[in-house]
Image (cartoon, rainbow, N blue to C red):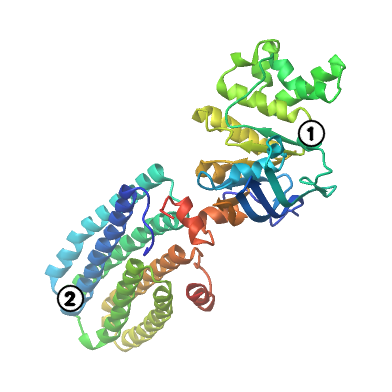
């Protein structure tokens, strides 16, 4: 945290291991989401197999990091910023794991879409765009976590609004397709699920950003208006 | 939802003691530097800080323990309510102060007398003679200290026959016997095992319905558990004072944070 070290070197080392574990897990989840979106665009089933395979590793990370948190709590009775870091990490890994689940969902849906052979690419541009925002939010959230930068974390939360807007616009497009040609309904519904998964990924990235603000500022900014949150983060 | 120790939102706080610009000197050495803070009535206030920071010195000002040694000097005041007496005033009798503010020390230090006499001693000094009244008061104090059930059948036994934790509760009973308004605890559990410690902590929690408590502790988890307010002291200065939950989750000063998280200052 850019600050003085603990009297116990082992404590510093344990916290550092925990933090780098979160970043590694985050990197893995980010790759999963990218692969999922690529699989959606390309129909490459190898990518889908990869996503499903790395889901196991993501789950392992979640369990092992949570376990490490428990160990630190029982051994060190962390207080103040250490306590906030541990609490936030435990929540962050849950968010990351759920993002992984969403990536897997996108992968499975993509497989069905491409197996059905109804993949009209022109309607995917908006989905791709929303996905790009979601991935970039996750990357920034992990960055803000690594550097413990509350101002950066706050800027991510604004972007979540953009994804929600994209999601509504995708829905409108798909409704139009379905009304024009009922044969597209099955595929369109699957794309709705994919868009929803992307929207959820954005929500999870936002949660991580809120956790970063909690670590740095000690203020719980969940369920507060963006303006209030930004004021807290920049104070 | 876990209830916080302080239910400040539903309660009005009454100051029991107001410390104003308190400095203390051991001869030429200044051990306390311009301390100002409020001790709220029927709350537990913990004093934490590294060895030599002045927390015990500060605690001892409240019942004029320093008067026992020559060369010690107080500056500033401690206004004690409801009568707004300056505890440090030259015209204020330290014996009278110690009747209102009792102290419990780090190591249990019962008198080499029976359990009964340990508790009755302060009352006798105060002039209480009636055996019946003494018995009543002793029982009340032992009950208050959570020792009655264990001690009622052995009141004539020598106090040293009690276990360490029981002896400490006997000292608390002795302190309670004179109906003090405030109790000072100077690391009351550092010589006790975890179970005896747990019993004393539970006792502190129950005692605050009646008395105001000021406790010095080296054990930060203990401060977090038992206190409503925490003061962090360093090199004779009050660095930060606030609601305990705030101090331990979100302290305002980096110095406080470094201390409670175990970092180098």
Q: Which of marks 2 and 1 is in front?
A: 1
**Residue A13: in sight, yes or no?**
yes
Above or below, A87 relative to A180: above
| Numbered tag placed on residue A114 in the rendering | 2
Q: Which residue is drawn at 23% across and 64% down?
A: A28
Task: Name the spot of residue B124 as percent of width and height, x first.
Answer: 81, 21
Q: Which residue is drawn at 30% across and 73% down?
A: A139
Above or below, A77 relative to B113: below
Number of other residues with Cα within 10 Å of mark 2, as a class: few under 14, some 14 to 19, many 20 or more: some
Q: Residue at x 66, y 56 (%)?
A: B34
Task: Name the spot of residue B20 as percent of width and height, x first.
Answer: 72, 55
Chain under numbered label 1: B
Instruction: Look at the numbered discs 2 and 1 and tell me whether their residues touch, using CB distance below 8 Å.
Output: no
Q: In the picture, residue A74 is in which quadrant? A: top left
Above or below, A97 relative to B193: below
| Numbered tag placed on residue B95 in the rendering | 1
Q: Is residue A213 left or right of residue B20?
A: left
Chain under numbered label 2: A
**Residue B4: in sight, yes or no?**
no
- Asked whether B242 or A166 is in front, the reply is B242
Q: Residue at x 77, y 39 (%)?
A: B181
Residue at mark 2 to residue at mark 1: CA–CA distance: 91 Å
Task: Name the spot of residue B44 as percent of width and height, x first.
Answer: 66, 44
Q: In this view, does A1 lie to the left or right of A104?
A: right
Number of numbered labels in the structure image: 2
Q: Is residue B223 left or right of residue B147?
A: left
- Asked whether B73 or B48 is in front, the reply is B73
SS of the residue under disc 2: helix
Share a chain, discs 2 and 1? no
């Amino acid at each position: 945290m850019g600050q003085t070290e603990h009297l116990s070197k082992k404590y510093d080392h344990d916290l550092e291991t925990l933090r780098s574990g979160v970043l590694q897990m985050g990197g893995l989840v980010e790759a999963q989401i990218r692969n999922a979106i690529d699989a959606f665009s390309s129909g490459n089933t190898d990518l889908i197999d990869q996503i499903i395979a790395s889901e196991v590793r993501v789950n392992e990370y979640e369990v092992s990091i949570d376990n490490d948190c428990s160990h630190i709590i029982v051994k060190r009775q962390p207080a103040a910023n250490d306590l906030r870091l541990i609490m936030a990490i435990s929540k962050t890994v849950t968010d990351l794991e759920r993002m992984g689940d969403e990536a897997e969902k996108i992968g499975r849906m993509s497989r069905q879409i491409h197996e059905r052979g109804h993949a009209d690419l022109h309607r995917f541009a908006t989905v791709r765009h929303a996905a790009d925002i979601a991935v970039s939010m996750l990357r920034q959230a992990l960055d803000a976590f690594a550097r413990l930068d509350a101002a950066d974390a706050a800027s991510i939360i604004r972007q979540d609004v953009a994804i929600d807007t994209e999601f509504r616009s995708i829905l409108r497009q798909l409704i139009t397709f379905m009304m024009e040609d009922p044969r597209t309904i099955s595929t369109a519904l699957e794309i709705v699920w994919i868009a929803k998964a992307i929207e959820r990924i954005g929500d999870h990235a936002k949660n991580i950003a809120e956790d970063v603000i909690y670590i740095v500022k000690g203020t719980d900014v969940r369920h507060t208006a963006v303006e209030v949150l930004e004021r807290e983060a920049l104070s | 939802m876990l209830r916080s120790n302080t239910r400040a939102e539903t309660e009005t706080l009454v100051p029991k003691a107001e410390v104003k610009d308190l400095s203390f000197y051991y001869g030429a050495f200044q051990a306390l530097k311009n301390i100002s803070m409020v001790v709220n009535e029927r709350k537990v206030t913990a004093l934490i800080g590294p060895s030599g920071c002045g927390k015990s010195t500060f605690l001892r000002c409240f019942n004029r323990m320093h008067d026992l040694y020559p060369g010690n000097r107080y500056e500033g005041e401690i206004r004690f309510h409801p009568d707004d007496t300056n505890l440090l005033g030259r015209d204020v009798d330290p014996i009278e102060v110690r009747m209102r503010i009792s102290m419990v020390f780090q190591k249990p230090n019962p008198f080499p007398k029976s359990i009964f006499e340990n508790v009755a001693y302060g009352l006798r000094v105060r002039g209480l003679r009636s055996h019946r009244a003494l018995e009543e008061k002793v029982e009340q104090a032992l009950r208050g200290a959570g020792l009655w059930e264990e001690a009622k059948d052995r009141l004539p036994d020598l106090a040293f026959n009690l276990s360490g934790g029981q002896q400490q509760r006997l000292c608390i009973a002795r302190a309670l016997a004179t109906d003090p308004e405030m109790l000072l605890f100077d690391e009351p559990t550092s010589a006790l095992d975890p179970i005896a410690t747990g019993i004393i902590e539970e006792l502190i929690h129950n005692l605050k319905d009646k008395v105001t408590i000021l406790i010095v502790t080296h054990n930060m988890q203990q401060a977090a558990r038992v206190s409503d307010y925490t003061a962090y002291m360093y090199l004779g200065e009050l660095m930060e004072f606030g609601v305990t939950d705030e101090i331990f989750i979100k302290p305002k000063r980096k110095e406080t944070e470094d201390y409670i998280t175990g970092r180098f200052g």
